[in-house]
Image (tube, helix red, strand yellow):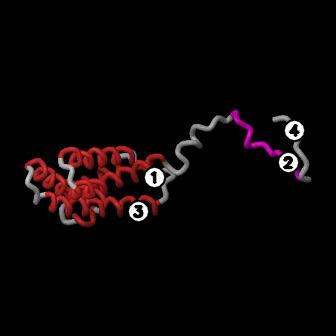
Amino acid sequence: MADAANNSGVPKGMRLVVRFWGAVSGLCSAALGFFVLFSFSATCLGMGIYMILMGAMILALEAPMCCQYVPTLVAVSNWIENHFRFWMRGCLYLILGLFPIIFCLEISTFVGCGCVIISAALYGVLAIGKKGGVASNANPDEQEMKTNLVDKEGGPNHTEP
């Protein structure tokens, strides 16, 4: 459904770079979530477990080849790829990434969830598209930049549009 909207105007290389960064951010979140577990606060302990689970989920969504032996995760990843638009995925990652930063402000939480928030920002860039929607919002009555200002000889063009 939304796959046609996801493919419109976005180069395949850009999508691959964003998915690669999403996989790296999932790994970073899970690894740094392990370090958050070694804290003295109960909320930070909970956020460490949350970061590990969030990293595993993001890794499964961004790089389903890492979880190819779990057919349910591959099916969920394919469904999300086909039905979630870029802005939906960006909002999901933004919400997932802000939650631990709010409850446990440590450097490991900030760096691990910051990678996920950067992934959200990159999906936001993909959602905006190549020209930022300017081409779709252009007024066809504006002829200012479409007319030729000079004729073939180099003199001013005096034709009225």
* 1 vs 2, front mark: 2
User: Is residue 92 visible in this depiction of the protein?
Assistant: yes
Q: Is tag 2's residue or tag 3's residue first in the polypeptide sequence?
A: 3
SS at circle 3: helix
SS at circle 2: loop
SS at circle 1: helix
User: Is residue 1 visible in this depiction of the protein?
Assistant: no
Of the numbered discs in the image, which one, if any, rests on residue 159?
A: 4
Q: Label 2, label 3: how many angstroms apart (C-alpha)?
A: 43 Å
Circle 4: is it few (<14), some (14-19), or many (20+) Cα within 10 Å? few
Disc 2 to disc 4: CB gap under 8 Å: no
Residue 103 at x, y = what percent?
Answer: 18, 45
Residue at image coords 49%, 50%: 8
Q: Label 2, label 4: how many angstroms apart (C-alpha)?
A: 10 Å
Magenta span: 141-152
Q: Quadrant of the N terminus?
A: top left
Q: Is tag 4's residue or tag 3's residue first in the polypeptide sequence?
A: 3
Q: Is residue 43 shown above or below 29? A: above
**Badge 1 is on which residue?**
7
Q: Label 4, label 3: how many angstroms apart (C-alpha)?
A: 48 Å
Residue type (three-letter) at the residue carrying disc 3: Val
**Does 108 appear in magenta?**
no
* 4 vs 1, front mark: 4
Q: Is tag 4's residue or tag 1's residue first in the polypeptide sequence?
A: 1
* 2 vs 4, front mark: 2
Q: Label 4, label 1: how many angstroms apart (C-alpha)?
A: 41 Å
Disc 3 to disc 1: CB gap under 8 Å: no
Q: Main secondary structure of the magenta part?
A: loop
Q: Quadrant of the C terminus?
A: top right
Residue 132 at x, y = what percent?
Answer: 52, 45
